[in-house]
Image: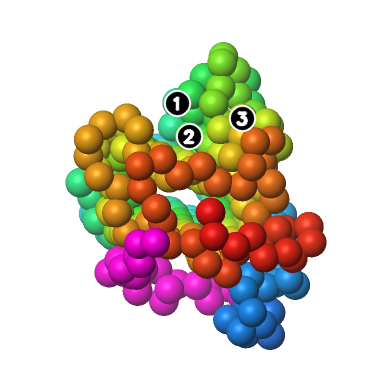
């Protein structure tokens, strides 16, 4: 079994500094300690409608679609009807509702650093939205409530994904639903303490594959991941590009239609994972 090299992106440090902004922390510390001692925690306060999305009491100002071009912009407290496209580094989008049937509800253009999306509701409408993603790009994604899209988060670069609630996936066309989708040419990702629910019997809660290139250093720890065909994939069947350094540690998994995991041409670090309903250790995969 390969042992993954755990790596925390520099952008995670900046994102963690924001975790306390006006919100009660999602994680139950006693449950977290239990998880460290004996696998995935059984009673953690998982992300849900109550602790993700726009903070209660926030007054939102109506706004149309946004294209952000100024580095360091802070976008807050908006009710946005239409997509958001971020074309500059170090942008923060927070405490806002974004509703759009666009291919990408929030798009972070490639090559940018320091982008943070936090405490937002991201609503893909659920119709007229073939192939849609709630967020597409790279950055720090914290405490967002993402729903009514085909794919909750699609990565094309390094990311920290923490305390998000991805659920009620719904799209037009012929969707292949993934809660979090990483389709290759991506490295250095932390996916920690999210709730991801795929209520369909196909595809995944977390999809990792080499369709567009190699994969390296993807840490998936202390999440609640439910449903899909297999709940999680690490699939190296598409190209000769390698998949390395993938770890699934201390997660609670609700079994997909076909099983908990599908690993092809790679062997992730797999430990401390349990069945979501029973707490039964899942052992090696």
Q: Earlier in the sequence, mark 2 or mark 1?
A: 1
Q: Is residue 196 above or below residue 278?
A: above
The residue that label 2 is drawn on is: 133
Q: Position of residue 32 (x, y in %)?
A: 62, 79
Q: Position of residue 226 (x, y in %)?
A: 66, 48
Most foreground residue, 72 or 103: 103
Tell me, yes or no, whether the highlighted magenta stretch contains residue 12.
yes
Measuring 52% from the left and 19% from the top, which residue is drawn there?
130
Measuring 59% from the left and 40% from the top, which residue is drawn there?
230
Instruction: Tell me, for residue 103, which label it has, or none.
Output: 1
Measuring 60% from the left and 18% from the top, which residue is drawn there?
172
The residue that label 3 is drawn on is: 202
Choose top left, top right, bottom left or bottom right for residue 183: top left
Q: Which residues are magenta?
A: 1-27
* Distance in Å between CA atoms under marks 2 and 1: 6 Å
Q: Single out the residue that lies furthest toward the right.
A: 278
Circles 2, 1 touching at the beta carbon (< 8 Å): yes
């Amino acid at each position: 079994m390969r042992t993954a090299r755990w790596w925390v992106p520099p952008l995670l440090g900046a994102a963690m500094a924001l975790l306390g902004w006006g919100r009660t922390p999602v994680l139950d510390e006693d449950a977290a300690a239990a998880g460290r001692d004996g696998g995935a925690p059984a009673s953690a306060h998982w992300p849900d409608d109550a602790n993700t999305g726009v903070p209660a009491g926030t007054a939102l100002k109506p706004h149309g679609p946004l294209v952000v071009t100024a580095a360091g912009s802070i976008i807050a407290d908006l009710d946005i009807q239409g997509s958001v496209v971020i074309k500059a580094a170090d942008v923060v989008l927070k405490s806002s509702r974004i509703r759009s049937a666009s291919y990408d509800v929030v798009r972070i253009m490639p090559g940018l650093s320091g982008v943070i999306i936090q405490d937002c509701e991201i609503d893909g409408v659920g119709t007229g939205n073939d192939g849609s993603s709630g967020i597409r790009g790279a950055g720090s994604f914290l405490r967002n409530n993402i729903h009514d899209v085909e794919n909750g988060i699609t990565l094309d670069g390094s990311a920290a994904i923490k305390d998000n609630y991805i659920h009620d996936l719904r799209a037009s066309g012929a969707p292949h639903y993934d809660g979090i989708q990483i389709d290759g040419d991506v490295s250095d990702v932390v996916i920690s303490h999210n709730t991801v629910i795929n209520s369909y019997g196909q595809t995944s809660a977390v999809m990792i594959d080499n369709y567009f290139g190699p994969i390296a250093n993807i840490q998936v720890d202390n999440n609640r991941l439910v449903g899909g065909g297999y709940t999680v994939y690490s699939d190296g069947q598409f190209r000769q590009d390698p998949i390395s350094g993938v770890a699934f540690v201390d997660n609670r998994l609700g079994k997909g239609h076909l099983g908990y995991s599908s690993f092809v041409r790679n062997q992730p670090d797999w430990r401390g994972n349990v069945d979501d309903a029973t707490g039964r250790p899942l052992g090696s995969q």
